Amino acid sequence: MDGLSEDCVACRENLAAYSLGALDAVERSALESHIESCDDCRSELAKYQQISRGLMAALSPRQPSPGLRRKLLRRLPGTSRPRFAFPHFSLGQAALGAALAVLIALNLFSLIKLQVFQAKQAGFVSQFETGQTALAMLAYPGTKTYPIEGQGVAGSLLMDADTNSAVLFVWNLPVLPANQAYQVWLIDVQGGRVSAGLFRTDASQPFTSVRLITPRSLSDFSGLGVTVEPARGSPGPSGQNVLKVNF
């Protein structure tokens, strides 16, 4: 799951089981502790719980059997009862329970597939918008192209200081685990680093394109670098440096 922390990834893998009451005490306690402080995961859990409630509400009420009163009376204090009591289910109840379990599983599976599709669609939209920006920059006479320097990677930077626009194109960057991301750092003339955004690579795409985000003019900087950082980014470079570009 792109852009999620390691805790969020672990939490979302257990949300379906939690909504069905299938987690042990330790897993349940860890998940509940996380969702108390994470709005996104709490929102995802609400979706799972809504599906479960909807399926339960769809079941029509059933008239209890005549023997139910006798069974309840036997469970009252002071009444005798067998040493070992085993639950008894009718064939219809068992079939209903199995059907309910299948419906919940199918709905959860569909929800997960939909979320994966939406994430991929958002990635395609971002790539398309970045490509449109790059095409516009190539048509602009002030755009300059700078080569990338890095071991095993290739690419270039398109930059137009007049319009404060820049797009980075990179080939051969490794795919990172879910708890990591690439972070772009613009380097000013005093050597200071300013974050210009986070990005991840997609194994299904031949290259990665990144539109840089900067609150300052690009003319204030003399180069950029890319490092491996935690999924939510770092306040300053702390991981492996994978490439650099000198303006």
Image: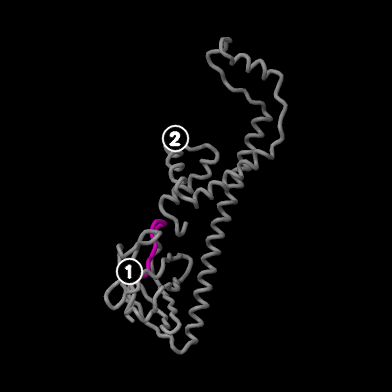
Determine whether label 2 and label 1 are within 8 Å by CB. Answer: no
Q: Residues within 10 Å of mark 1 (few under 14, many from 20)?
A: some
**Residue at (48% x, 87% y) in the render:** 140
Using the rendered view, name the quadrant where residue 71 is placed: top right
Image spot of residue 178 (x, y percent): 42, 57
Q: Which kind of residue does numbered mark 2 sit on?
A: Ala
Where residue 204 appears, x then y in whole percent?
Answer: 48, 66
Q: Residue at x 72, y 35 (%)?
A: 60
Residue 121 horizontal/vertical position (percent): 55, 64
Whole-Å distance between the Cαs marked 2 and 1?
A: 42 Å
Looking at this view, name the residue that lies furthest to the bottom: 141
Q: Quadrant of residue 74?
A: top right
Residue 55 painted magenta:
no
Answer with left or right where residue 4 lies relative to residue 88.
left
User: Which label belongs to residue 141?
Assistant: none
Q: Please, what secondary structure does the residue beneath circle 2 have?
A: helix
Residue underneath mark 1 = 242
Name the one closer to the observer, 228 or 33. 33
Magenta stretch, residue numbers: 177-184
